[in-house]
Structures are given as C-alpha cells and as structure tokens.
Amino acid sequence: MLKALTSTTRAQQKIESASPRTLAASSATIAVLQSNSLPALVQRDLERMIVAGELPAGTKLNETALAQSLGVSRGPIREAFRALEESGLVRLTKNRGVFVRQVSVEEADEIYELRAILDEYAGRKAAQTATRANIAELQALVARMDDAAARVDLDAYHRANVEFHDLLVKLAGNAKLLQTYRRLVNELHLYRRATLAQEGALPVSTREHHAIVERIAARQSIQAGRALFEHAMGSRTRMHSVRSAPAAALQAAAGSGRTKR
C-alpha cells in the first residue's frame, strides 16, 4: 500500500491516457498523499503491523530494512519511530535501537484499572451527550462485531472493537482524555488480542457491547458507566486466564485473525 502511494509521480504521468477507473484510483492515491505526510503514512503502516502482531512485542525494528520494505527513505522511518514512541507502541533505547514495546502483566493490570475508570467516565458522558446519529454509529460498530464474531474473524472484530471504544471516548469531548486513552489502548494491544482469541470470548464481548449501547440509548448514565467499567475489568480477568497457556494465546493473538469458514 505504502509503496503504491510513493509511486505517485509515475501515476501522474499516466493520468491523461488512463481509463476512468484507473484515473479514479490514481486520483484517490494522490488525495491520500496530499492529506497525509509521508511519515504519517509510514507510522500508520507500522502501527498496523504492530497491532496485527506482524511485528511482535520485543522485536527490534531495523530502520534500513523497514525503509527498503516500505519503499521510503530512512527519514520518514525515524519520524514514525518518534511518533510511535509517543503513542506507547515502541520504546527507543539509547545505543541499542528501537523495539516494539513489551508490557508486563503487572503493568497491564495497572493499565486495565486506569482504563476501567476512564471507560466508566466516558460511558456516563456518552449517555448524556450522544445524539441519535452517534448511537446509530455505535450500533453499526456492534453489528460489525456481531458479523466478525459469527465468522470468527479476530482481525475484523478487533478493528471494530477499537473503533467502538475510541468513539465512546470521543463523545466525552475531552481531547486530553482521548489522547491518554489511545495510549493506554496501544499499550494493551497484544493482551487485548490474546483475550479475544480465547475460546468463547467473542460472544461474551459482543453481549457486553450490546448492553453498553442499550444503556447509552436509554440515557442511563450511571448504568452505562458501570457496564463499561465491568467490561474493562472483565477483560483484565480474561487476560489472567490466558496466562495458563501463554504461548498458545500469544500465537493466536499474532496469527489467528484469518476467517474460519
């Protein structure tokens, strides 16, 4: 994807002779580049690979190899590394390099507790401020989770799940809260995928998300907040149950996103 975007000059040279379909695709590519800096596109690609488990926790990131793989110079890679460190996905160690961040179970416990408190606040605010359009958007995301759960598509479920919680926090209308929350989510990404990969976890998670939206739609502020608090703490409990079979769980988190048919 990124390599295709970096070849925009060649695409522009062929625009005059392109078919309408090709012209539309080229215009879309150019629009993406115009609205995003190259370091931001590199960051997005690396973030996707980390969250998907393609770059596992503890992996040392090689600047030169990544630049060659993504078809860019080393400058955008360095800028992306700095942004990823700020977002909590990598750590920069002096004289050693850049590594995909590893979070201990003890630290994950603390993050889940903090996230539960923030989720409770966000749920209360959402029940007070969400518009009909906001609620419809939340319902659409839950429908995507239902569909992904039915297909046992962990990748699709994880994406919709992250979007759901991100939207809830956005509805609180607090930029600092959103920034803090996103960093916590990034730090927990591997554990969250592992808990979702557990047998029977997806149906439990979807039921909890349905209950959350129902309470928000009913303007039940306290109940919505409590449902979100318990949802986060339930994820923490599931994280600990994964520890009984860590190798299998982490393998599932990294590679079980394929749809079962």
Image (tube, grey):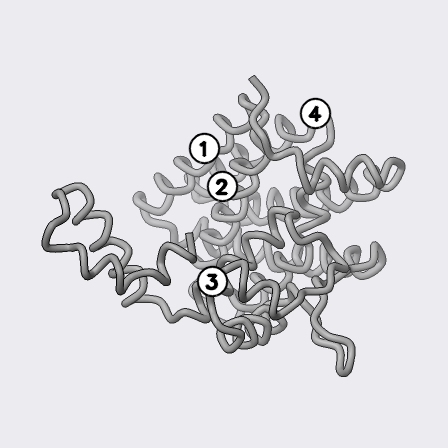
| Residues at marks 4 and 2 touching, judged by CB atoms closer than 8 Å | no
Amino acid type, label 2: Ala
User: Along the horizontal axis of the image, is 102 left or right of 117?
Assistant: right
Q: Position of residue 247 (x, y in %)?
A: 84, 39
| Residue at screen point 83% across, 43% down | 240
- Mark 2 and mark 3 lie on one chain; the one further toward the N terminus is 3
Q: Which mark is residue 144?
A: 1
Q: Residues within 10 Å of mark 3 (few under 14, many from 20)?
A: some
The residue closer to the viewer here, 35 or 203, is: 35
Q: Residues within 10 Å of mark 1 (few under 14, many from 20)?
A: some
Q: Position of residue 187 (x, y in %)?
A: 67, 60
Task: Give the CA separation, mark 3 to mark 1.
Answer: 33 Å
The residue closer to the viewer here, 24 or 128, is: 24
Residue lying at the far bottom in this picture: please name it.
94
Q: Residues within 10 Å of mark 2 (few under 14, many from 20)?
A: many
| Residue at screen point 73% across, 31% down | 198
Q: Which mark is residue 126?
A: none
Q: Which mark is residue 200?
A: 4
The residue closer to the viewer here, 9 or 248, is: 9
Task: Give the CA separation, mark 4 to mark 1.
Answer: 18 Å
| Residue at screen point 26% across, 60% down | 10
- Mark 4 and mark 2 lie on one chain; the one further toward the N terminus is 2
Relative vertical location of residue 183 with respect to residue 157 in this rendering, above or below: below
Task: Give the CA separation, mark 4 to mark 2.
Answer: 18 Å
Amino acid type, label 3: Gly
User: Along the horizontal axis of the image, is 224 left or right of 172?
Assistant: right
Q: Which mark is residue 71?
A: 3
Task: Give the CA separation, mark 2 to mark 3.
Answer: 29 Å
| Residues at marks 1 and 2 touching, judged by CB atoms closer than 8 Å | yes
Q: Which mark is residue 160?
A: 2
User: Along the horizontal axis of the image, is 45 left or right of 29?
Assistant: right
Task: Give the CA separation, mark 3 to mark 4.
Answer: 41 Å
